[in-house]
Image (tube, rainbow, N blue to C red):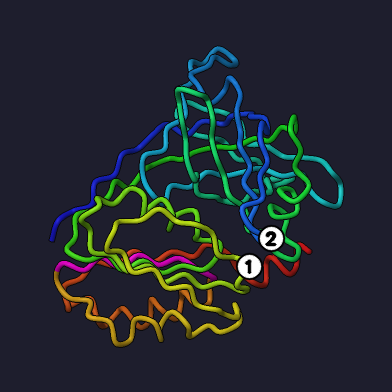
Amino acid sequence: MNQIAVQRFPITLREVEVIGVEDLSPRMRRIVLGGEQLGAFRKDGRELPAFQSLGPDDHVKLFFPDPRTSSIALPQQGDGRLHWPDDPPTISREYTPRAHDASSGRLILDFVLHDGGIAGGWAAGAQIGDRIHLAGPKASMLLPAAERYLLIGDETALPALANWLEMLPDTATVTAIILIGDEAARIPLKAPESAEIRWLLHDPGQTDVLVGLVRDEPLGQGVYLWAAAERKAVEALRAHLAPRKDEGGRFDVSTYWTLRMEQEMA
């Protein structure tokens, strides 16, 4: 089985600024970030590297103030790593860079505007000139070679799914299944010419949805399955896939959010 190539980076805390805001749909908002710290910079006697993101599903952490106290706890920069405070703890959420252009100094993040949720709430009210801290990514998974790609995700995975579809070669055989809560969540996607893209209406409370989508799918040698969605749905999918590993395919399954957490933060 071919190993997946991963490129690792020193973890760097950066302060960036909102330089653009755009609504991609009634349910998704694009935030464009910029600032000197996306490039190489010096702080507290340390030379810190420029931001890099090379894979389709990289993750950066965004840091937010406590909604009750409005105070923000940030990690401290170390040598290639961060030191995390215990009291108060940091409040952070992970997001996939939708695009990064080092030449123009722009980093694009797309946010699903959940009902409630600390990150979605920030994005809903973001204005040009607002500042936010981010860290990472600590690594990029480079595109794996496969004969067929099966990509499955809900709305929170749309940035990563869009990256996958754009980064794959035009000759790739790929099926993308996108779970949405409303038809208004559809956005244009650039994809290989022969890509099959399916948009399915979905209730996040249906935890067996991912299992149902792969139950009859061939997952043998040459197949690469990537999936990302709500925690309970992902847990059910992992349990389903565990006995299917001997079929020969490769699986990359990730939790992107937790329904209970978003409800509690509302």
Name the chief secondary structure element in magenta.
strand
- Would you name the residue on which mark 2 appears? 26
Is residue 47 rendered to the left or right of residue 113? Answer: left
Q: Which residue is drawn at 14% across and 71% down?
A: 221
Is residue 159 rendered to the left or right of residue 243? Answer: right
Q: Residue at x 74, y 48 (%)?
A: 122
Q: Residue at x 66, y 50 (%)?
A: 23
Q: Which residue is drawn at 76% across and 38% down?
A: 127
Region rendered in magenta: 222-230
Residue furthest to the front:
193
| Image quadrant containing the N terminus | bottom left
Q: Would you identify the image quadrant in which residue 180 lies?
A: bottom right
Place of residue 202 in the rendered image (x, y in percent of width and height, measured from the top left): 56, 79
Counting residues from the start of the chain, the first of labels 1 and 2 encountered is 2
| Image quadrant containing the C terminus | bottom right
Q: Would you identify the image quadrant in which residue 237 lies?
A: bottom left
Tag 1 and tag 2, C-beta contact below 8 Å: yes
Instruction: Identify the disc placed on residue 93.
Output: none
- Would you name the residue on which mark 1 appears? 184
Q: Nearer the viewer, residue 87 or 66?
A: 66
